[in-house]
Amino acid sequence: MNEYGFYIIIGDFNYFVFWRNLVNAVLIILVILLLYVILRILKNRIIDEKTITYTNLSTIIYKWNNRAIITFSDLSRFVGKLKNNLPHGNGKFINNNYAPANLKFNEGESSLVKIFKTENGYNYNFISKNNIIFNKQLITLLKYIVSINSLALLIAIAKMPYGYYIFLRILTTITFCIFVYIAYIENKIKTASLSGILAIIYNPIVRFPLGKDVWIIINLITIPIILLLYIINRRSQ
C-alpha cells in the first residue's frame, strides 16, 4: 500500500488498485443509489395521485404536493390548493378564451371567477367576465402600447419637433387612462391614483410649463412606472 493505491493479492493473482479508481467506483455506486431512491420516491408520489371523474365530465386530480388540478367540462382548468374540496389560497385559472389568471381564492371565491362543486361535479361562473384585464387581446395590445410609449419617452430626451411632444402627451395620457380603468375594475385605489395623476400631467389639453430639463426628468421617471404597472397587471393574469 502506498500513496497511489494498494495491491490485491490472492494466491498467484496480483492486482494494483489506484485510490482514485476506488473513489470513483464508490461515487458511482452512491450516485446510482441516490437515483434509485429518487425514482422510488417519485414513483410512490405518482401512485399517490388520485383522479376523480364526475358525471358532468369535470375531473379533479389530487397531486402529491398538496395541490390539485380541476378540469371543467369546457376544458378550462384550475391549478392550486384546496380547502373543503374548493380552491383556496393562490391558484391559477386557465380558460381558452382569456389570459391565464393568477388569483387568490377563498373556498372557491375570487375577484374574477367563482368555482363551486355540485353533485354532478365542478363548475365555475365568471364574476367579472367583461373585466378588461382578463381579456387576452387587451393584454397583447397593452404590451405594444407600453413598449411604444416607453420608447417614445426615451426619444423625447433628444431635441424633437414640437409636434412630436404633442403626440407623446396624447399617447402617454391614453396609456395611463387604460391603467386607471384597469385599476378601477380591480379596486386598486393607489394604482388608479398614481395613473390618474400622471394622465393629468401628460394631458394634451392643459400644458404644464415645467421646462425642458424638468420634463426630461419626468420622462425618465415615467418609463419605469409604465413598465412596472404593466408587469403588475400582467402578473395578475
Image (spheres, rainbow, N blue to C red):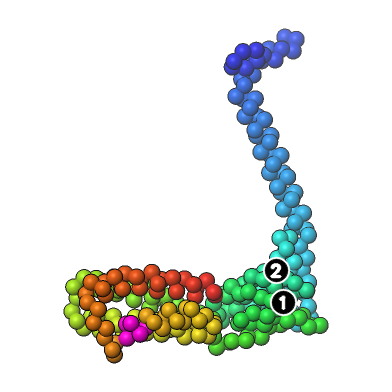
Question: Which quarter of the figure has residue 157?
Answer: bottom left
Percent of width and height locating residue 226: 40, 74
Q: Write down the region rendered in magenta.
A: 199-203
> Majority secondary structure of the magenta segment?
helix
The C terminus lies in quadrant: bottom right
Kindly identify the residue that appears in the image at 65 percent across and 33 percent down. 27
Q: Which residue is identified by label 1?
A: 107
The N terminus lies in quadrant: top right
Position of 147 relative to 23 (above/below):
below
* In this rendering, the label closer to the viewer, 2 or 1: 1
Position of 20 relative to 176 (above/below):
above
Percent of width and height locating residue 92: 62, 72
Percent of width and height locating residue 197: 39, 82
| Front residue (pair 39, 198) | 198
Question: Which quarter of the figure has residue 171?
Answer: bottom left
Kindly identify the residue that appears in the image at 45 percent across and 74 percent down. 229
| Front residue (pair 128, 186) | 186
Percent of width and height locating residue 115: 69, 80
Q: Which residue is identified by label 2?
A: 81
The amino acid at mark 2 is Lys
In magenta stretch: residue 235 = no
Position of 9 relative to 236 (above/below):
above
Whether residue 221 is visible here, answered yes or no, is yes
Is the residue marked by circle 2 packed among few (<14), some (14-19), or many (20+) residues within 10 Å?
Answer: many
In magenta stretch: residue 200 = yes
The amino acid at mark 1 is Glu
Tag 1 secondary structure: loop
Is the residue marked by circle 1 packed among few (<14), some (14-19), or many (20+) residues within 10 Å?
Answer: some
